[in-house]
Protein backbone atom coordinates (compact mmCIF):
# COMPACT_ATOMS: atom_id res chain seq x y z
CA UNK A 1 0.00 0.00 0.00
CA UNK A 2 2.85 2.37 0.83
CA UNK A 3 4.48 1.73 -2.51
CA UNK A 4 1.29 2.53 -4.33
CA UNK A 5 0.87 5.83 -2.50
CA UNK A 6 4.54 6.67 -3.05
CA UNK A 7 4.23 5.82 -6.73
CA UNK A 8 1.15 8.02 -7.15
CA UNK A 9 2.80 10.85 -5.19
CA UNK A 10 5.90 10.58 -7.38
CA UNK A 11 3.76 10.60 -10.55
CA UNK A 12 1.88 13.66 -9.29
CA UNK A 13 5.11 15.50 -8.56
CA UNK A 14 6.54 14.51 -11.95
CA UNK A 15 3.43 15.81 -13.73
CA UNK A 16 3.54 19.07 -11.78
CA UNK A 17 7.22 19.54 -12.61
CA UNK A 18 6.45 18.96 -16.29
CA UNK A 19 3.54 21.40 -16.09
CA UNK A 20 5.54 24.20 -14.49
CA UNK A 21 9.02 23.66 -15.91
CA UNK A 22 8.54 21.57 -19.06
CA UNK A 23 8.50 22.68 -22.67
CA UNK A 24 4.81 23.63 -22.49
CA UNK A 25 5.17 25.27 -19.11
CA UNK A 26 2.61 27.64 -17.66
CA UNK A 27 4.75 30.82 -17.88
CA UNK A 28 5.04 30.14 -21.61
CA UNK A 29 1.38 31.06 -21.86
CA UNK A 30 2.33 34.72 -21.31
CA UNK A 31 4.63 34.63 -24.31
CA UNK A 32 1.85 33.17 -26.42
CA UNK A 33 -0.64 35.76 -25.17
CA UNK A 34 1.76 38.55 -26.16
CA UNK A 35 2.17 36.95 -29.59
CA UNK A 36 -1.62 36.85 -29.94
CA UNK A 37 -1.86 40.57 -29.07
CA UNK A 38 0.85 41.42 -31.63
CA UNK A 39 -0.81 39.31 -34.30
CA UNK A 40 -4.20 40.87 -33.54
CA UNK A 41 -2.73 44.34 -34.08
CA UNK A 42 -1.13 43.22 -37.34
CA UNK A 43 -4.41 41.69 -38.47
CA UNK A 44 -6.27 44.93 -37.71
CA UNK A 45 -3.86 46.90 -39.91
CA UNK A 46 -4.31 44.36 -42.70
CA UNK A 47 -8.11 44.45 -42.36
CA UNK A 48 -8.05 48.24 -42.75
CA UNK A 49 -5.76 47.98 -45.78
CA UNK A 50 -8.03 45.37 -47.35
CA UNK A 51 -11.06 47.60 -46.76
CA UNK A 52 -9.28 50.47 -48.54
CA UNK A 53 -8.38 48.21 -51.44
CA UNK A 54 -11.94 46.88 -51.68
CA UNK A 55 -13.29 50.44 -51.75
CA UNK A 56 -10.85 51.29 -54.53
CA UNK A 57 -11.89 48.20 -56.50
CA UNK A 58 -15.55 49.17 -56.18
CA UNK A 59 -14.74 52.71 -57.37
CA UNK A 60 -12.82 51.38 -60.36
CA UNK A 61 -15.64 49.02 -61.32
CA UNK A 62 -18.42 51.59 -60.97
CA UNK A 63 -17.12 54.48 -62.97
CA UNK A 64 -14.49 56.05 -65.12
CA UNK A 65 -13.68 58.86 -62.69
CA UNK A 66 -11.55 56.68 -60.42
CA UNK A 67 -9.69 55.14 -63.37
CA UNK A 68 -9.07 58.59 -64.85
CA UNK A 69 -7.82 59.96 -61.55
CA UNK A 70 -5.46 57.03 -61.13
CA UNK A 71 -4.15 57.35 -64.70
CA UNK A 72 -3.52 61.06 -64.18
CA UNK A 73 -1.74 60.69 -60.84
CA UNK A 74 0.28 57.53 -61.47
CA UNK A 75 0.89 57.63 -65.22
CA UNK A 76 0.80 61.36 -65.89
CA UNK A 77 -1.81 61.05 -68.63
CA UNK A 78 -3.60 64.10 -70.02
CA UNK A 79 -6.57 64.53 -72.34
CA UNK A 80 -5.97 65.55 -75.95
CA UNK A 81 -7.46 69.04 -75.44
CA UNK A 82 -5.38 69.71 -72.31
CA UNK A 83 -1.96 71.30 -72.10
CA UNK A 84 0.44 69.88 -69.54
CA UNK A 85 2.81 72.24 -67.74
CA UNK A 86 5.52 71.05 -65.40
CA UNK A 87 6.99 73.60 -63.06
CA UNK A 88 10.41 72.81 -61.65
CA UNK A 89 11.38 74.17 -58.28
CA UNK A 90 14.82 75.83 -57.96
CA UNK A 91 15.92 73.20 -55.42
CA UNK A 92 15.21 70.48 -57.99
CA UNK A 93 17.40 72.16 -60.55
CA UNK A 94 20.33 72.51 -58.11
CA UNK A 95 20.16 68.92 -56.95
CA UNK A 96 20.57 67.59 -60.52
CA UNK A 97 23.91 69.28 -61.07
Image (cartoon, rainbow, N blue to C red):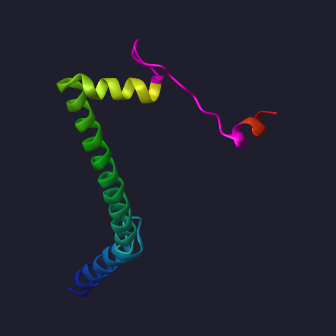
| Image: 68 above or below 95 | above
* Residue drawn at the location 70% of the way across and 38% of the way down: 92
x and y, in percent, of residue 75 in the image: 46, 23
The answer to which image quadrant residue 5 occupies is bottom left
Q: Is residue 50 above or below residue 40?
A: above
The residue lying toward the viewer, choosing from 37 and 87, is: 87
**Which residue is at 40% across, 68% downward?**
31
User: Which sits in the foreground, 83 or 1?
Assistant: 83
Q: Is residue 71 left or right of residue 11?
A: right
| Image quarter (top left, top right, bottom left or bottom right) of the C terminus | top right
Residue positioned most to the top:
80
Q: Is residue 90 magenta?
A: yes
Report the span colored magenta: 75-92
Q: Which image quarter: residue 52?
A: top left
Q: Describe residue 16's horizontal placement relative to residue 54 as left or right.
A: right
Place of residue 27 in the rendered image (x, y in percent of width and height, measured from the top left)? 38, 75
Q: Residue at x 37, y 67 (%)?
A: 34
Dominant SS of magenta comes to loop
Nearer-the-camera pick, 60 or 79: 79
Classify 13 as above or below 67. below
The vertical placement of 90 against 31, above or below, is: above
Work out which residue is located at the far left of the displayed protein and give it: 62
Q: Is residue 88 left or right of residue 56?
A: right
User: At 41% across and 26% down in the image, what residue appears?
Assistant: 72
Q: Position of residue 74 (x, y in %)?
A: 45, 28
- The quarter of the rendered structure image containing the N terminus is bottom left
Amino acid sequence: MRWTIALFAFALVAMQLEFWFGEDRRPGVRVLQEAVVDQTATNQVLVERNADLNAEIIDLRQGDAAAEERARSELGLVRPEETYYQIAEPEDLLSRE
